[in-house]
Amino acid sequence: MVMAVVIMAATLGGKLGAAQVHHVVGGDRGWDLSSDVASWSSGRSFRVGDKIWFAYAAAQESIAEVNSPEEYESCDVSNPIRMYTDGIDGIPLDGEGIRYFVSGKEESCKNGLKLHVEVMPFGNPEPEKPRVAVAAAAPTTPSGSARLYGSSVLLLVGLWLCHMAI
């Protein structure tokens, strides 16, 4: 997970020019049954221009973006829009509408490892600078957002890594 955060921070370093939120699916636990993805996503706003990040063990998991609510509910990955298998995947939310993501493992999907995202039009109810949203580890607690601006992204991630090493 630490490597995922380092890679994400390096990727985000120079790309926060436009107002957008980077959502790390499942928070600290990433894409995992223990993260309770449904609770993590409830109450979140996803907008055009945001990006969702999936972090998972590539040797044990994959993610499929499926076409319909029926494929989502039945965990049918026989005809996905796309399969994600890299272990850390950043997916831009570039259009309005509902997108469906499920575990590539049928058993995990049937046990709730799936996410539907309703992407709203670009813009925020209040003007803000770019930010990164990070969910709390406990799925029952509403998560806060850590607002990281410009070049301070790498600094804050570095401090977090130092703290985790202690």
Image (cartoon, grey):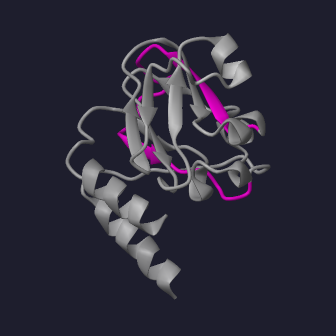
Q: Nearer the viewer, residue 82 or 42?
A: 82
Residue at 39% from the left image edge and 66% from the top image edge? 3
Q: Would you say 152 lies left or right of 124 here?
A: left
Q: Quadrant of residue 108?
A: top right
In the displayed structure, does residue 49 sit left or right of residue 96?
left
Q: Residue furthest left?
A: 14
Q: Which residues are magenta?
A: 112-138
Residue at the image position 64 percent from the left and 16 percent from the top? 71
x, y percentage for residue 137? 67, 59
Q: Is residue 26 visible?
A: yes
Q: Does 37 sit above or below residue 102? A: below
Q: In the image, what residue occupies the spot 45% across and 72% down?
A: 160
Q: Is residue 125 magenta?
A: yes
Measured from the top left, where is residue 136 in percent x and y?
A: 65, 55
Q: Is residue 150 visible?
A: no
SS majority, magenta: loop
29 horizontally vs 87: left or right: right
Task: Give the mark count.
Answer: 0
User: Residue 34: x percent and y percent?
Assistant: 73, 54
- Residue at x 44%, y 50% (from the top left corner): 147
Q: Magenta stretch containing residue 28, yes or no?
A: no
Name above or below for residue 21 compared with residue 48: below
Residue 47 screen position, x and y as percent: 47, 23
Quadrant of res 85: top left
Query: Does 145 appear above or below 1?
Result: above
Q: Residue furthest front?
A: 78
Displayed quadrant of residue 116: top right
